[in-house]
Amino acid sequence: MTVSPDSVPAVAAHPNSVPPILELRGAGYRYRRGALAVNDVSLAVHPGRSLGLVGESGSGKTTLLTLMLGLARPNAGEVRFDGEPLRTGDAALMRRFRASVQTVFQDPYSSLDPRQRVERIVAEPLRSLGIARGADARERVIASLESVGLPADAAGRYPHEFSGGQRQRIAIARATVCHPRLLLADEPVSALDVSTRIQVIDLLARLRAENGLALVMVSHDLSAVATLCDDTVVLRAGRVVEASATRALLGAPREGYTRRLVDAVPRLPA
């Protein structure tokens, strides 16, 4: 994975020089009220690699993820998918993009429709992308649920019948049912208790290893970033202040802002 904004030293290129799935080049975004949320951010997400986006609230992490999802267009720079500019008006390109790039949201309680059974929820990407219907879709749903550690009979139940951790597993099953190449996760464990966080982090790590998934994760949880992410980008006020391999960045941060983030992580007494 390459992270190379002009304002910070570039991280070494992907060892196999594999073209990125998704790339931002000098991306900037300003809200209508005039606030600048993201300014001149460049990064690239390569197949099978993982990137953490960290920073305090208001640093631009979620806005950056919104640009990467194609839910907003940058006011400056561009987003590229498989080497092409991401044109939201190009239906064929966006269909291919949606099949390749899926997302897991922060809150497992609000991200699942309470009126629908789990089978219909998880099958949604298959239907909307025209990948599978009927018995084929059901077979894929069951396989996806089992891959995240849920039984086949979960398909016939409603979200309210599950715990928060189980709901997040359902959300992950929905995001991976169409076998995407890249998973974008917005604070995927922040709404869960500590023990459940560990289980979901372990699940994401396993799915990455088994399926060769690329991952971009927005998180305040630096322990989750350390476990899941090959590289990390630190954002402050919409700009990249530091970008490096995760182990090096967390072990010996160069910037004072990054050191403060690392020092703020609670530690057990010796």
Image: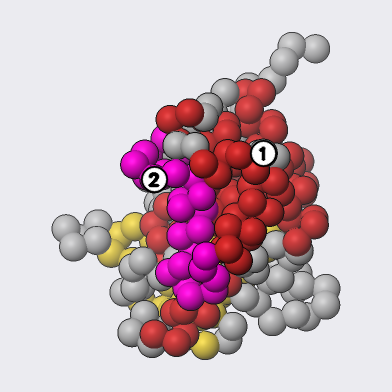
Task: Judge from the rendering whether residue 147 lies leftward or rightward of residue 221; answer left or right.
Answer: right
Q: Which mark is residue 183?
A: none
Q: What residue is shown at x 24% (from left), y 61% (from top)?
A: 31
**C-alpha gap between disc 2 and disc 1:** 18 Å
**Residue flagged by tag 1: what amino acid is it?**
Pro
Q: Which residues are magenta?
A: 108-134
**Residue flagged by tag 2: what amino acid is it?**
Gln
Q: Position of residue 265 (x, y in %)?
A: 62, 28
Residue 123 in the magenta stretch? The answer is yes
Question: Residue at label 2?
Answer: 116
Q: Residues within 10 Å of mark 1 (few under 14, many from 20)?
A: few
Q: What residue is shown at x 61% (from left), y 39% (from top)?
A: 153
Looking at the image, which is closer to me, 224 or 34? 224
Looking at the image, which is closer to me, 202 or 77? 202
Label 2: which secondary element:
loop
Q: What residue is shown at x 47% (from left), y 85% (from top)?
A: 93
